[in-house]
Amino acid sequence: MQLFFNSRVITLAMLASLAPFAIDTYLPAFHIIAEDFFTTPESIQQSLTFYLLPYTLMTLFHGAISDTIGRIRTIQWGLVLFFFASIGCALSTTVESLWFFRALQGIGGGAGNVVARAMVRDLYQGPQAQRVMATIQIIFGIAPAIAPMIGGLLLGFDWHAIFIFLAFYAALMIGMSSYILPETMPLSE
């Protein structure tokens, strides 16, 4: 239970939870976004593919990137890209621009998840690492359940608010990861 109140573990779990929030928060808004863009719901559903494909591909590279430039810097660059892409999604006026910014979100969004898991390996050993990963997985598992509810609440304002929320989430994670997490990858000169 103590791990649920550990700021490092919470930060790592929130980094890992960015992906479910990016995927599930805007699901309730599909039909409204489709109406706003004068397109079909299927076109809006394609924005999931435009997010998931780069997200999946970049999971192959974020670990190597973090080994090269450092864990924190990789998280920061990924989250900054995700932040600006979320603003781009909120300001989109066509389905094609939404697709483009969702792809950018996917490129940046995977950094937190991949690097958070690498940091668990760097910071913890043995049974403690297993407990930390279990705690992260529990929190990670809650995210897909609450993300559509948050999206539904934000939809009461406007669908754009969902992407503004994702931008704020990324900004919060930039701050938390910068001030709470240590750099665990010693960089060679």
Image (tube, rainbow, N blue to C red):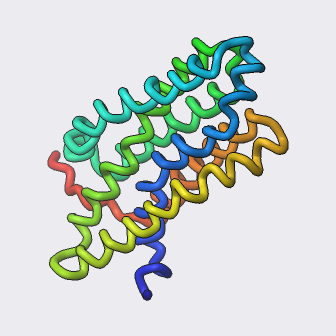
Indicate the position of residue 89 as horizontal and vertical percent values: 63, 27
Left or right: 110 as drawn, with respect to 30 = left
Indicate the position of residue 40 as horizontal and vertical percent values: 65, 16
Q: Can residue 178 be seen in the rendering of this structure?
A: no
Left or right: 45 as drawn, with respect to 107 = right
Q: Can residue 19 be seen in the rendering of this structure?
A: yes
Indicate the position of residue 180 as horizontal and vertical percent values: 46, 67
Residue under the image location 51 percent in, 36 percent down: 82
Height in image: 30 above or below 171? Answer: above
Q: Quadrant of the C terminus?
A: top left
Residue under the image location 16 percent in, 78 percent down: 126
Height in image: 26 above or below 148? Answer: above
Q: Quadrant of the N terminus?
A: bottom left
Question: Foreground residue, 39 or 21?
Answer: 39
Rendered image quadrant of residue 128: bottom left
Residue under the image location 68 percent in, 20 percent down: 92
Height in image: 76 above or below 121? Answer: above
Question: Foreground residue, 4 or 178?
Answer: 4
Left or right: 158 as drawn, with respect to 104 = right
Left or right: 33 as drawn, with respect to 140 = right
Height in image: 150 above or below 99? Answer: below
